[in-house]
Amino acid sequence: MTKSSGRRPRRPTMVDVAREAGVALSTVSRVVNQDPTVGADFARRVQTAITTLGYRPDEQARQLRRGTSRTIGMAAREMSARNPVLAEFELGAHAAGLVVLGASTADDVERERSVVLSMAHRGFDGVLMEPIGTDHSYLASEIASGLAVVAVDRPVSGPDTDAVLSDNTAGIRLAYRQLADHGHRRIAYIGDHERIFTGHERASAFRACLAADGRPQTGLVHTGETEQARISEAVRAVLSAEVRATALVCGNVTTTFAVLAHLAAEVPRGQRPAMVGFDDFPLAELLDPPLTVIAQHTGEMAHAALRLMTARLAELERAVETVTVPVSLIARGSGEIPPRE
């Protein structure tokens, strides 16, 4: 059994590198900071010593000297393939020479605050946020200190920041009209909590569609947390009402998954309602029937977010900009099913 003293082995320093290479400390510093005026022989000796000793520069100290870290944080509800905007942003940022590190906020307001402030206090140049809270006043001092903040999918509540949004209202109108045009008169909406910007915008747009058509809203709009139990209860309610819904609009991809799971478990195939989901996802076209969706243009959103981030890093005092990206309806079959009375 090997005993540990509890102490970490001492990390080699620039002094050690200088001694190993037989050069001045200032020469090591110039090589580490990529000074092109260092002679080739000196540079080779220093690099050999760095490799031999396993020396790693103090990145935070280098950041302080250069005034930038070239590091961007991503703080989002979910860091997964369900969030392609983040994946595409990271690819573009990497190509631009930026390092991107992400953390999930897990739909928790306090966790979001902790994650974002940790990134700011660790010297990140900017943060790409998918905000979930309703009070982001804590960002004001960080922005004033030079933190670049870009919000994606929903705006920050409080200080003005750059933002990239989808056209939520237009998307819900497209979904509603697609179902109405196929004969549906009793269309229900199941969506996210309305304390979230996108949840509020989409539910409000759906209510406006009902009002414009002269339809009653009672029992047709169900919003709240995206747990399976709550969504299953909502589906049961709209399908078991005295005048049952013949079509559903799902407010986001998490809701769509939960609705599909409930229908598969409890509703016979021939009795399932027509359905349109907000957000596309891989394999949606392979479902039976293939899922009609409102697709956000994730590549365009990621490109816009990266453009805003790099512009803000280059000029912190530039005017705040909001980009609203259009959405599209992809008709695949589930939204084109006629009413099953």
Image (spheres, helix red, strand yellow):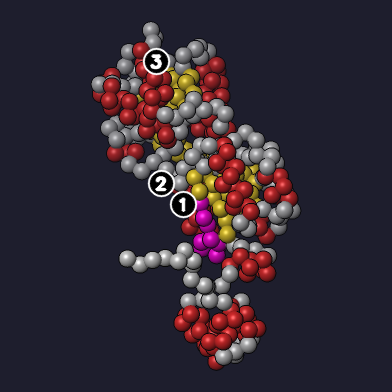
Pick whichever, 97 or 24, lies toward us: 24
What span is colored magenta in the figure?
Answer: 94-102
Q: Could you tell whether 288 is left or right of 161 in the image?
A: left
Q: How far across and down, in percent of the image, does residue 256 sit?
A: 39, 31
Pick whichever, 288 or 233, lies toward us: 233
- Residue with the most extreme top position: 242
Residue at position x 62%, y 80% in the image: 29
Visible residue check, residue 324: no
Disc on the earlier residue, 3 or 1: 1
Label 2 belongs to which residue? 81
316 to 162, vertically: above or below: below
- Give the SS element for disc 2: loop
Q: Quadrant of residue 335?
A: top left
Q: Are marks 1 and 2 in contact (CB under 8 Å)?
A: yes
31 to 265, vertically: above or below: below
Q: Residues within 10 Å of mark 1 (few under 14, many from 20)?
A: some
**Circle on res. 87:** 1
Q: How far across and down, in percent of the image, does residue 33 sit?
A: 61, 76
* Label 1 – label 2 distance at C-alpha: 8 Å
Residue type, mark 3 in image: Ala
Q: Quadrant of residue 122?
A: bottom right
Label 3 belongs to which residue? 237
Q: Could you tell whether 330 is left or right of 21 in the image?
A: left
Residue type, mark 1 in image: Ala
Q: How many marks?
A: 3
Disc on the earlier residue, 2 or 3: 2
Name the image quarter holding the N terminus. bottom left
Name the image quarter holding the C terminus. top left
Residue type, mark 2 in image: Ala
